[in-house]
Structure formats: structure tokens, C-alpha cells
Amino acid sequence: MRTRTVTAMIAVGAATGMLACAAPASAQPPGLAKQDTLAWLAPPGLEVGAAVAGGGHHENQEYPDPFFFDTEYRELLANEFTSLTPENQLKWDFVHPEPDVYDFEAADAIVEFAEQNGQDVRGHTLLWHNQNPAWLEEGDFTAAELRAILRDHIRTVVGRYAGQIDQWEVANEIFDDSGNLRAQENIWLRELGPGIVADAFRWAHEADPSAELFLNDYNVEGINAKSDAYYALVQDLLADGVPIHGMGHQAHLGLQYGFDPGLQQNLERFGDLGLVTAITELDIRMELGEDGVPTAEQVAEQARRFSAVLEACLAVDSCESFTLWGASDLYSWVPHTFAGQGSATPWTEDLERKPAYCALQRTLAEASPGGAQRFAHHPAYAECRALLS
Ligand code: XIL
């Protein structure tokens, strides 16, 4: 069993100024460990991904940037996933902190890591109302200047990773839950009007013609006013010849909200427009009592819902990517954003697998011919069988 604490990790980092030591070798017989991962079980045509922790809320935490520091976490990212999304490291405030300054250090390291491990990278994000630097939000720019700023940013960032970042979430969260454009909150929409969305896609396409370009949002899992607004926008963009290729469904879910059964149908309708679709930021949070420990019912229900989202994606041809927003509760944004809630990822703070992990593993196994049998009997899956029983 792995045991670890944040304080121990910091002590190692502080003492050596280097990466922490590698995790103890797995207790599994040689040859089995590789099969015992989500990456191994993912069927052809489906990338299984995770956010790479760093930046954002992590900057207020007592631990250093997890990706550079936590070796055991890096191993998990390398072994379990076929796709990675920088959680914050490509957002404006991180990558473009001053008007003439770009900081690519963290994103470069993630892209290089992904290349070494044969993984896709999803770029997140280019046009958003959040996590913009003060110089941009509080600057006194004319519309022409703002246009040039956005165009240069997109050309610089997308161009730097041309051929290396496979998908870009170009425009993030541009509609509110009623299906109205965020015409006030979003600096680009406010100052430049709705046409800027198409321009952002065009500039990104010019900078990397091989990248798949996405819209992306939360609360667009089912069929509702917000996903309808995206559905209409995609049709308009396609009719205008705008290079848009995909629709990202974040899927920040919570046990307290029920589960929208329309997910599969919704993925299908975007696929029918000729788009690829993706689950881009799945986590499933829950309300926790004072002890912070989920109940057995919550644990079981969370496992069911993780696999229900995966099943919907597996059932739809267009759904080519399934990304978790966090590969450990230790680094999850949830407790820092939603008071009293947590336990939102399939791994505990100690990087132990939860039943949610095993439900994903089983669902992936069952998606391949003979997979159900293999999952039921093969020694590689004994740990998960025990956790699910
Ligand atoms: C979150 C990050 O996980 C946090 O670290 C950060 O402090 C705030 O943003 N939708 C998105 C993501 O598109 O970029 C957000 O990520 C979660 C909601």
C-alpha cells in the first residue's frame, strides 16, 4: 500500500531541491502492471485523459507545482492516460502574464512529457472570461488593439505547439446557463462582439492547420438551453466555413444534482453535425460531512456515475476523448471552489484507487471483445474486482 502525506513530500523537496524519490515498486507480478491501467484498456479511437495539476488554485496551496515535484503523480499520469490537458498552464494569466512576456516553461514541460509517453495534449484555452491577466482586463485598449492582442496571442501560443498540441479548446464557456452569450463578463465578446469567436477559430487554424479546434463548456452534458445555444452556434459557424471541429463537454458533476440521462443523445446530435465530441473535464463532487469522508452510498453512486459518463461516450462514435479533471483528490480544484464538497476524482489523496476508478476500468474492459471475461478472471484486475465487490 502507498502511504504519503503532503508534508512528507514537501520535506523531501525542500531537503533535496529535486524531485521526490520514485514510488515503491508495484506489488503486481511483472507483465501485469501495464494491463492494469485505463490507458491499456482504452479501445481504439478513444483517448483517456487527465488534467495536469499546476497553476490556478495550486498557487495558493502549501505544496509546490505538483507536475514538477510529485514523482508518483507523474508516474500515474504517464501510465494511466493517453491524453493530457494542462489544468492552468496555458491560460492567459499563466502563459501571458505581461503584455510582452510569455512564460512557456510549464506548458513546454507537459508537452515534452506527453511526447515521451506517446500521449495527446489538449490545449486549454484561448478565449475565456476567467483567469485573464490584470494588464488585459484592466488595460485601456481600443477595439483594434484588443483584436491584435488576441490574434497575436493565438498565433504565438498555438504556433509554438503546432503539430504537438492535438486539440485546442479555443473558446471556453462563452454562453451562460440560459444560453445567452456572456456579452458582459467576457472581455472579447464585450469589446469586439460575437464575431470574434469565429476569428479566434480562424487564427488558431492558421497557426496550426492540423489541430482540432473545439468549443468547450460546463452544464452542456444534457439537452438544455445552453447546449441548444452551442448547437445553433456550431451550425452557424459551419455554414460560414469556420474551421471548428469539436464540442467539449466539461462534465463537472455533483452527486447532489442527479444525473442527466440526455448525455448520449446530446453527444450524438453534435456528432451528427460532423463534429468530434469529447468529455473534457469530468469530476463528480459530493457534499461531505465534518469528517470529510464520503459515505458508502456516495462512493458507490460516484462509481456508477463515472462509468455512466464513460458509457455514453463509448456509445457515440464522435466521442473520441474522455478526460478527468484531476487524477487525485489531493490536487482537485473542488474543495477550494465548492465549500464543503470534495472527493471528486477517482483517486484518493494518497493516490489510492477508489471504486470510481475500478468502475471506469471495468467499463473500458467491457468495451472490447472478450473484455468482460478478462476483467472477471485475469489476475491483473484483482485489485479492482475486490474494490467493486
Ligand atoms: C479550474 C482549475 O482546476 C483551478 O486550478 C483554477 O483555480 C480555476 O480553474 N472550467 C474550466 C477549467 O474550463 O479551466 C476550470 O479549471 C474548471 C472549470
Image (cartoon, rainbow, N blue to C red):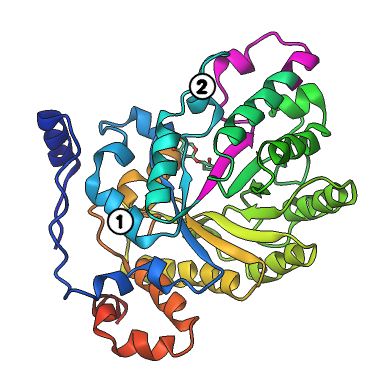
Q: Residues within 10 Å of mark 2 (few under 14, many from 20)?
A: some
Given residues 116 and 229, the one toward you in this image is 116
Residue 302 point in image, percent of width and height = 42, 66
| Direction from residue 279 to residue 205 in the image, left or right | right
Given residues 388 and 119, the one toward you in this image is 119
Q: Residue furthest right?
A: 239
| Direction from residue 60 to residue 154 in the image, left or right | right
Residue 174 point in image, percent of width and height = 71, 39
Residue 124 covered by magenta stretch: yes
Given residues 99 and 188, the one toward you in this image is 99
Secondary structure state at the residue bearing disc 1:
helix
Closer to the chain start, of discs 2 and 1, is 1
Q: Which residue is mark 1?
A: 76
Residue 54 point in image, percent of width and height = 38, 37
Q: Residue at x 50, y 74 (%)?
A: 43
Residue 323 point in image, percent of width and height = 50, 57
Under mark 2, the amino acid is Tyr
Q: Residues within 10 Å of mark 1 (few under 14, many from 20)?
A: some
Q: Quadrant of residue 152?
A: top right
Quadrant showing the N terminus: bottom left
Q: Residue at x 63, y 26 (%)?
A: 153
Task: Please say if 169 is above or below 159.
Answer: below
Task: Please say if 79 is above or below 342.
Answer: below
Q: Quadrant of residue 363?
A: bottom left
Secondary structure state at the residue bearing disc 2:
loop
Q: Which residue is mark 2?
A: 102
Range covered by the magenta-colored residues: 121-147
State if disc 1 and disc 2 touch (CB < 8 Å).
no
Q: Residue at x 54, y 74 (%)?
A: 311
